[in-house]
Amino acid sequence: MNILILGGGGREHALAWAVMQNPKCDRLIVAPGNAGIAQIAECPRLDILDGEAVAGFCAENAVDLVIIGPEAPLAAGMADQLRAAGLSVFGPSGAAARLETSKSFTKAICAACGAPTAGYARFTEAEAAKAHVRDKGCPIVVKADGLAAGKGVIVAMDEDTALAAIDDMFLGEFGAAGAEVVIEEFMTGEEASFFVLCDGNTALPVGTAQDHKRAFDGDEGPNTGGMGAYSPAPVLTDALVQKTMDEIVQPTIAEMARRGTPYQGVLYVGLMIEDGQPRLVEYNVRFGDPECQVLMMRLGAQALDLMQACAEGRLHETQVNWAEDHAMTVVMAATGYPGSYEKGSVIKGLDNLPEDSMSMVFHAGTTERDGRIIASGGRVLNVTARGATLGEARDRAYAMIGRIDWPEGFNRGDIGWRALD
Ligand code: AMP
Ligand code: GLY
């Protein structure tokens, strides 16, 4: 098979690494890719938001399967355009991607199918939104309806913060994403992420993970895209996974199919769990980054068979073969991230690190210059390891970090603390 993966972060490096191990994979192409991905795949220049360009590339290169990594091309309808061109695609249609691109859409789906989630109200002007906040009291959660690069959610512990967030959103801080604002009840509990492949009819769980969103140890500092993750998430017991499938995932998929917009791809289910009850925090329509890195480390080559079956509507024929293992990824980021940071520093020490089914450094934001690896993003490396226990995976990952020579970078030292305590 010739396989094209769209994207160029740590998630796509992990996807490429897993796919490449499957003997079915003949030619592996990742666009735009990065310096780490270029070590295992062809990385052509291709505008991954341009459906015609991607479809043309697929025709010229006899691509058999396209795997879409990030949300932006999905939101832009890339999967629709490629399917219309006759391609086999892993990723939801633009209409189904609304589960990520519109928070009020997701809330309406939950209401229609009875999936447990935070109570909410939606507003298109500030005064009514503010009156609602004054009425409900704090803590309360203010969300820009649309995609806001992970920044459109304000968990307001006091009224001033909530009112200021409402003003910011309606004054356009998040652009069109903030033209509508969703205000939610604040949920307490433990957060976990659950990943399910869906082919429109069948839903197949492919793993659980927990992410660390704050920049610094002890869950301090600003919110980031994720500073590390581990899988499985101990809070998501088998019983809770079943409950989540029964009460949240299956009803959602049935509702999407009923509306004529069946969901096909990976559904990232963000959950809040309290007293044995899962509630939906959010859906994303792609693998999490860095959660994907730990899922791929655990799934290995079968990830390709699963994604292919998903794209072809054959998930009912498949099953996941689980090992009793654990994986952890630790993000190394450029100093200053998620604020402003320098690009262009040189990363040394990567050549001598193990690259096998237990240990991998996935590249998130790197480029190659004159044979050297250069940091070119905020999140730069995802140092990932597997082990019989989470402790073993952690020790292996942090041992690799100790051998990476990159003074301009930083990482959290406590990834997995909640599960390791
Ligand atoms: P989201 O972009 O929807 O994932 O929100 C980002 C983060 O905000 C989540 O991971 C939660 O930690 C927090 N959050 C979102 N909605 C709620 C809620 N209703 N109650 C409590 N925390 C929330
Ligand atoms: N790690 C969080 C996300 O991918 O949205």
Image: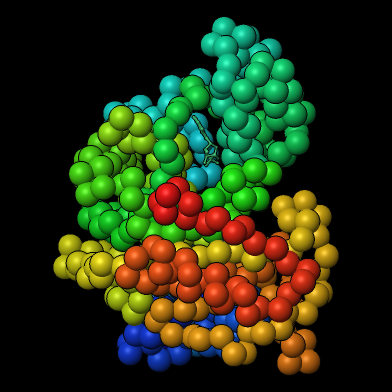
Q: Is residue 342 above or below residue 157?
A: below
Q: Is residue 3 above or below residue 187?
A: below
Residue 12 percent coordinates (x, y): 52, 71
Colour mode of the rendering: rainbow
Residue 91 falls left or right of residue 319: right
Residue at image location 28% in from the left, 56% down from the top: 205
Q: Quadrant of the N terminus?
A: bottom left
Residue at image location 16% in from the left, 68% down from the top: 317
The residue closer to the viewer here, 411 or 244, is 411
Q: Is residue 162 above or below residue 136?
A: below
Q: Quadrant of residue 303?
A: bottom left
Residue 212 percent coordinates (x, y): 54, 50
Residue furthest to the front in view is: 421
Residue 333 falls left or right of residue 191: right
Residue at image location 75% in from the left, 36% down from the top: 173
Residue 417 percent coordinates (x, y): 48, 52
